[in-house]
Amino acid sequence: MDGLSVGSLYALIALGYTMVYGVLQFINFAHGDIVMIGAWLSFWICARLGWAGNDAPPSLARAAATLLFAMVVCGTLGFLIERLAYRPLRSAPRLNILITAIGMSLLLENVGQLPIVFGTENQGMPGLLPKETLLSVAGVNITLIDVLIIGCSIALMAGLNHLVYSTRLGLAMRAASFDTKTASLMGVNINRTISLAFVIGAMLAAAAGFLYAVKYTNLNQPAFPTWILLGLTAFVAAVVGGIGNIRGAMIGGVLIGLLEKFGTAYVSSSFKEVYVFSILILVLLFKPTGILGSARVEKV
Amino acid sequence: MPLLELHNVKVRYGAIEALHGIDLNVEQGQIVALLGANGAGKSTTLRTVSGLLRPASGTVLFDGKPIQGLPPHKIVELGIAHVPEGRGIFANFTVDENLAVGAYTRSDKAGVAADRERVLEMFPRLRERLRQNAGTLSGGEQQMLAIGRALLARPRLLLLDEPSLGLAPQIVRQIFALIRRINADGTTILLVEQNVHMALDAASYGYVLEVGSIAMHDFPATLKTSDQVRKAYLGVA
């Protein structure tokens, strides 16, 4: 159950990597940091509104408001990052934009550490969602918070799935992802599609950050390795599922989450990362395009 | 006033100038053939008209209004559809989805449905394969899909880049018959072709590009008898 809820968080984050990769064939290394910002923004707004503190009562309305706030701010941030940092480099060699993404990642971490932003102290996220155990089935504890996390992730992913596979806008996004030039000849506004991929990706990352914060409540300082590892694991999930493939990212996320938790429970928790990256190596060896990925023919 | 006018259009790829200032007119209702050897700049000309390339200088007028420098999606909205070289089929989409992307700029559902019906009537093979992945179609079917998809944008000017490339002679004849029919239905066409015979038979005017400049332009009957064209492109000594 824990694996499923962690897995759905990975899936939410992996979607951002995969959508941006789909249209730009570029790994947005700053994406993991949006998750951190989403988590910290959730804490920040709660502290501002006086909802912080360990004795704060669980409240679905407050949780929803916090989630919405984090998603809107991160969505805007995602839009600005693409607009200001990546778009000017669109026609530059691929390596330039990759280095810029790593720079952006460091920038976000370090700006996050500034005293006027989030500071360098760990913080305790208020328990906005109730922690109680709903029921135990065969020794598996099903907690309300995990159910809420999974439900929230499924709702967001179902929304995205509908947008991408059943709307005109989604058709345009998929067309742009297959072939940007031809899509533009069909009247698809490529710049707008790319912005949209960044905004949606950042909003999902913010949601993952928020859910992560309410699940674990201990918020590490912005540049702490847990955040980097969280982003990296989600990136592995995107690759395992087939990078560029939206449904693949969802499957990859859940798979990695389950694997990590089962490995931790039955073998050893000190090998947590080993499971994740072993799977990455196995997938790269035997099916380099990922579970749902299709071979992309390089045009010469 | 011509539907499309190019004045002294120069296009560069980095330091290399691919078009050295060309002038070209396409009158309303015509099929204009743009001929020339590989690398002469035919595809470059089409890409410049549809906005994939920006001219370094010169003007492109569509319906009397300058369109050079506009992004491709704006140019489609103005009424120019470009069927690119290699067809640009979305291979992982179904045939139906490919057609839907073609109508992306339009919001008149009834009009789109009517045009889709018209396209399917024109290309019956596509109707049989609507739910099939476009990547599984034969080359000729893909070309028909590419043209049908472009028609769904309801263009006033259709740019066709090598529609006969890599197709069997019988399919090429079918494609050319369809090109004439689309033109007879009121769409102006600028046609880039290596198949000079077929292109000149269909066209009402022709331009010959040589290494980035217009070498000659005239009516097809005159071009066919010109020594220069006969030697270079018709394989007649």
Image: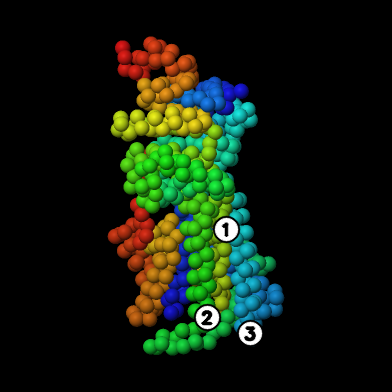
Mark yes or no: residue A97 visible.
yes
Q: Is residue A70 above or below residue A129?
A: above
The image quarter in which residue A265 lies = bottom left
Q: Residues within 10 Å of mark 2 (few under 14, many from 20)?
A: many
Q: Earlier in the sequence, mark 3 or mark 2?
A: 3
Q: Circle 1 is placed at which residue position?
A: A199
Secondary element under disc 1, as helix, strand or loop, is: helix
Q: For this rendering, which residue is in front, B144 or A39? A: B144
Q: What is the distance, in whole Å, between disc 1 and disc 2 at their CAs?
A: 27 Å
Three-letter residue code for mark 3? Pro
The image quarter in which residue A131 lies = bottom right
Residue at x 32%, y 42% (from the top left corner):
B138
Q: Are dots 1 and 2 in contact, CB under 8 Å?
A: no
- x and y percent of residue A46 in the render? 66, 75
Q: Circle 2 is placed at which residue position?
A: A145
Residue at x 54%, y 44% (from the top left corner):
B111
Q: Read off the chain for label 2.
A: A
Q: Circle 3 is placed at which residue position?
A: A57
Three-letter residue code for mark 1? Val
Q: Are dots 3 and 2 in contact, CB under 8 Å?
A: no
Q: Read off the chain for label 1.
A: A
Mark yes or no: residue B41 visible.
no
- x and y percent of residue A3 in the render? 42, 76
Q: Is residue A268 above or below residue A168?
A: below
Q: For this rendering, which residue is in front, A270 or A71? A: A71
Three-letter residue code for mark 2? Ile
